[in-house]
Amino acid sequence: MAIEKVEGKKFEATPATLIQLGSAALLVVLALVFGWLAFSRWRFKTNLVEGYRAHDSRNLGQARTFLRNAMSWREDHPGPPLLLAKMACEAGETGAAEPLYQKLRAMGYDRPQVRVGAGVLALRKALAASDPKEINRLVGLAMAEFKSAGADTPEGEIGLGHCELVLSHKLNETTRTATARTIFGRVKTALESKEGYRRQITREGLLDFYAGLGKAAGSGAAYDVGAVGAYTACAQYAALWEVPQKSMVAVEGLRFARWRDPSPPQLAEAKADALKGFLAFNNRWRPNAAVWNKLKEQWMSSVLAASMAYARAGMEKEFVEFLELVTRAGGFTDRVEPYQAEAVGRSILALRESETVSANERSRLIATAFARCDTLLPRLKAENDPKNEWRARTLNMMGAFEAWRAANQRQPTVNQRALDRFNEAVKLAPDHYVYNRNAALILFRQKKPLSAYQQHLDKARAAATGDYAKDFDELLKVVAGN
């Protein structure tokens, strides 16, 4: 029996068929569109989250890469350009930050973070400017941006404090420092008393706050322990950032440099903590060569400043302890600065007026100071004394020691050696008041005629300004009887 052939049904383009086909195609297109949107959203979120994570880990190179990738997937989201602009500002890359802030404002995103960032951008430009009018203009823009962020925005208030510091630094408007100190004090009070205010501040905001507070407190005429505390707190948030580390040790150096007339008990009390602090700083950072190279100059200068304070107070033992800290712990044996500090410090110790120093002790101090000056001279080279200022100063100190011996140890022939030193100093600095004054005085003591030292007197007279004016009047009274 034969099987009947079944004929297939022919396709008919009926309206119902066309609708079904169109619906299926639409569903395919929608699936592709939604799939792409889901994929792009996933790629955007992945790069954004990774960018934030890298930034929080201070891996800034990776953070920039992820954030730029996030921007390529979604240009209308404020997150990536906001953080990229902030990072560019922190790095001083104002050219990269400016278009990003413009982009955010063009998007209608003008929140306090953008206003603070724009203020930081203007302040960065002010720091790089040199024209006073331009500096004032840029700081004015920065202040306007910070104020517009609102009084409840910590970074806005902190920015206003930094505006005052920039004007103080760039335009030498010293009263601005006190204003900055008041602003940072107000922020400090708010952070301690208002939980909502404290919750708003970012890690970078805290760094700016403590750095600004340290700068304002450390710039006063008197030592402020609050400056050290502020820089210490700043360093805790950014352990490898050299600015607070350098500033922390600089404040200690300024403490001693500005301490002109401390009593020995005051200095004795400060000695243990200062030595301990300087040594701890050295022990912490010297093993890390990359960081130490950025900090060592400030550390050496600060320790030498402390050493000189003890020399001015007549405390020889303590003077030597700080000096040896530079060479022993710091390893600065090949640098000229410790030798310069020792020559000057020994000279101060030898020539300072004191009723408690015996003649024998004075003689010892003079001999030691002379020897240190003699050791310093060959170390003065063109690279560390290009204008021969230190050579002239050292020769003058040695001449002063010779003159003391001639006057106090009845060695009149030594006067000639003193004169030779003063003449060498005058050759190196022909118009210097002290060198000409000393040369004239030693010639007077040798009972030379006025004509022999008239030229030195004329040079001294021309340079006798400020503090030298009174000394020159005294000199004229001495030589008038010749």
Image (cartoon, helix red, strand yellow):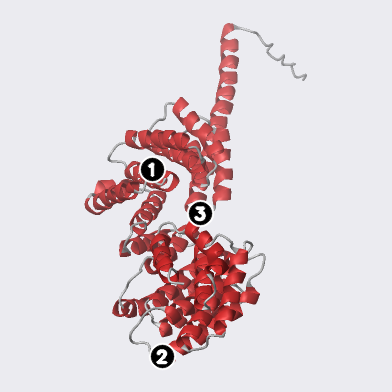
Q: Is residue 326 visible?
A: no
Q: Residues within 10 Å of mark 3 (few under 14, many from 20)?
A: few
Q: Nearer the viewer, residue 355 or 443?
A: 443
Tell me the number on the disc at residue 7: none
- Work out whether mark 2 precedes mark 3 in sequence or the reverse, and give the earlier one: 3
Instruction: Pinpoint residue 195: horizontal percent, then vertical percent.
Output: 25, 50
The vertical placement of 364 against 241, above or below, is below
Give the residue type that dot 1 points to. Answer: Cys
Quarter location, residue 229 = bottom left
Give the residue type that dot 2 points to. Answer: Ala
The vertical placement of 68 against 339, above or below, is above
- Work out whether mark 1 precedes mark 3 in sequence or the reverse, and give the earlier one: 3
Q: Which residue is mark 1?
A: 163
Q: Which residue is mark 3?
A: 58
Q: Residue at x 52, y 46 (%)?
A: 51
- Work out whether mark 1 precedes mark 2 in sequence or the reverse, and give the earlier one: 1
Quarter location, residue 221 = bottom left
Q: Is residue 225 visible?
A: yes
- Name the front one of labels 1 and 3: 1
Q: Residues within 10 Å of mark 1 (few under 14, many from 20)?
A: many
